[in-house]
Image: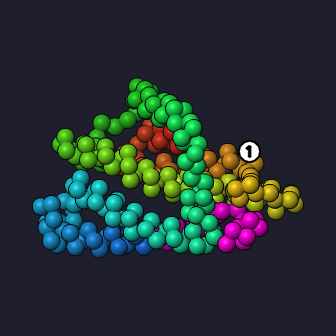
Amino acid sequence: ARSIARHDTRRIPHLGHVAMLGVLLLGGLLCTIFVVLGAVLLHLFGIHRTQDAQHSMAYAIGTMVVWYGIAFAPAAPIFSSLWRRKFSAGIQWNSAFVRRRWYLLMAVGVACFALAVSARSILHIPEKSPIAGLLNTPIAVWTMFAFAISLAPLCEELIFRGFLLPAFATACDWLAERFTHRVPRPLTEHLHPRWSIPAMAAGSVLTSAIFALFHAGQIGNAIGPILLIFTISLIL
């Protein structure tokens, strides 16, 4: 396997792998719908109707946990087998960099938080939104906080920065190579793609646009918060 990987010239993940992940996410979503309907029929958490489930924090968090769990549980072994390398290596999970530059990453996080807080005085952020309607008790607030700093960002980063961003950058370079007849850049020593600056810029913008639209429903489709999320995604 190591000998095969050493001579592997494929740029991964590409858009085909994104499509495969999309199939897993769609399958997980369909399974989650049946789980939620079953929970409503059993009147779990005191919910008797699907309409009431939409306003329940337990169902909101539970839906995301089940969805991501079903979708990502098979993702690691499937892609690891397909790529002939560890899943973490395929998506460039660089834990060594985190250990070396944790202070820099923490500073970026604080800066994003400061940007979000200061943006309230510049952008029109609605007082009421679908997600704000769920935060009606201290328990709900802390539950959402715990979810928002653990499973949610982990899975979203896998989707957007782990798969979409490199796939878009690779696609942009691939198109440029087709039109200019340029020879593809060799992979790095760790078998990662070498993208051009324009490809990385285009990939970042496309990924951030989809990232912002993905969260639009949670904030009532308000333009101000969407622009803010788009900007933070660019930073990420």
Outermost residue, front direction?
2
Observer-nearest residue: 127 or 40?
Answer: 40
Magenta region includes residue 141: no
Question: On the picture, is 36 further left or further right than 161?
Answer: left
Magenta segment range? 1-25
Q: Position of residue 152 (x, y in %)?
A: 39, 52
Residue, x 54% and y 41% (percent of image)?
99
Q: Position of residue 235 (x, y in %)?
A: 56, 38
Residue, x 54% and y 32% (percent of image)?
104
Amino acid of disc 1: Ile
Magenta region includes residue 19: yes
For residue 21, say whether it is visible: yes
- Viewport quadrant of the N terminus: bottom right
Observer-nearest residue: 148 or 79?
Answer: 79
Which residue is denoted by mark 1 in the rendering?
Answer: 197
Residue, x 64% and y 51% (percent of image)?
203
